[in-house]
Image (cartoon, rainbow, N blue to C red):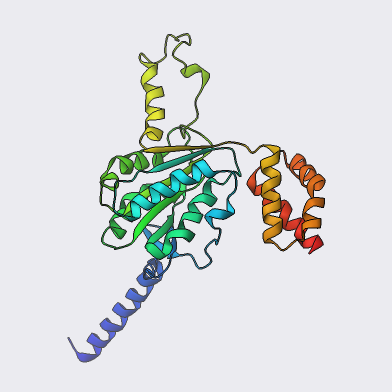
Amino acid sequence: MSAVDLTTLITRAERVLAQLEAWLPPAPPAINWDARAYRWRRQGAQGWLEAIKHVSHIQPEDLQHIEEQKAIIERNTRHFLQGKPANNVLMTGARGTGKSSLVKAMLAAYSEQGLRLIEVDKAHLGDLGDIVDLVSARPEKFIIFCDDLSFEEGEGGYKALKSVLDGSISASGDNVLIYATSNRRHLMPEYMSENLTAKHQPDGEVHPGETVEEKISLSERFGIWVSFRPFRQDDYLDIVYYWLKELGCPQADIEASRTEALQWALGRGSRSGRVARQFAQDWAARHV
């Protein structure tokens, strides 16, 4: 083969390689292990930890009237950081009552002690095993956070999460826990037809009770269940006043906000901590 033919062959090969590279997905970015919080990203067959640049600064003391729930989560998180046995946590209950905020508050309180947070969307729960492997050699302690978690019939993430909860991350001394929030206590829909006292259909399951047991078995794999209840009116107003004070409102304006605060909650059909903070931000913007 002449030198000219060899040069032509090399040129063609480089052109083919360039075309192939254009079709291939880019390599995942390097992980910034100096970050405090991450979000699991996926593109095609590749997944990676993306550092979150702007992390919520909410503190545990900002969360009012959930002292019992806060004490349970704080105790479990401290045990985790101290290398003691700790449990995966499922937080359920009314919306806007501080479930996800409490997880973020743990990061704010304990990040200096090595706590880190990884947010994982429900669609990516099948990658949990890969995430655990990725951080297993790190010295930090990682909470994998699954927010607003629930499953419909046949979703693959259900079995993936169940498998991981049963697996190595539950062992004492590991550096990963799962904290999840949900509006459903058992994470999956339940139907009247599944009641064991319901009339059996000719073509129905022989053992319908096993179907029900399968549905509740996932939530039972969380060692700690924490329930959040709707706030009473006085609790809601306390939270409004707390945020108004934090936002710099004078006491006279804070006391004058009561009627509008109640009307604001009535209009939204909820006396939650989230609604209280939203009202306080609007009131402060108009009065400070």
Q: Is residue 43 shown to the viewer in this render?
A: no
183 vs 4, nearest the viewer: 183
The answer to whether 140 appears left or right of 53 in the picture is left
The tally of labels here is: 0
Task: Locate residue 174, reporting x and y percent.
Answer: 27, 52
Q: Quadrant of residue 34?
A: bottom left
67 up-or-down from 213: above or below:
below
The answer to whether 100 appears left or right of 155 in the picture is right
Task: Locate residue 116, reporting x and y percent.
Answer: 40, 60
115 up-or-down from 124: above or below:
below
Residue at image position (73%, 52%) is 279
**Which quarter shows the C terminus?**
bottom right
Task: Locate residue 133, reporting x and y percent.
Answer: 28, 56
Residue at image position (44%, 43%) is 72
Residue at image position (81%, 61%) is 287
207 vs 286, nearest the viewer: 286
Residue at image position (17%, 86%) is 1
238 vs 5, nearest the viewer: 238
Task: Locate residue 180, reporting x and y percent.
Answer: 45, 44
Residue sticking out furthest to the front: 251
Residue sticking out furthest to the bottom: 3
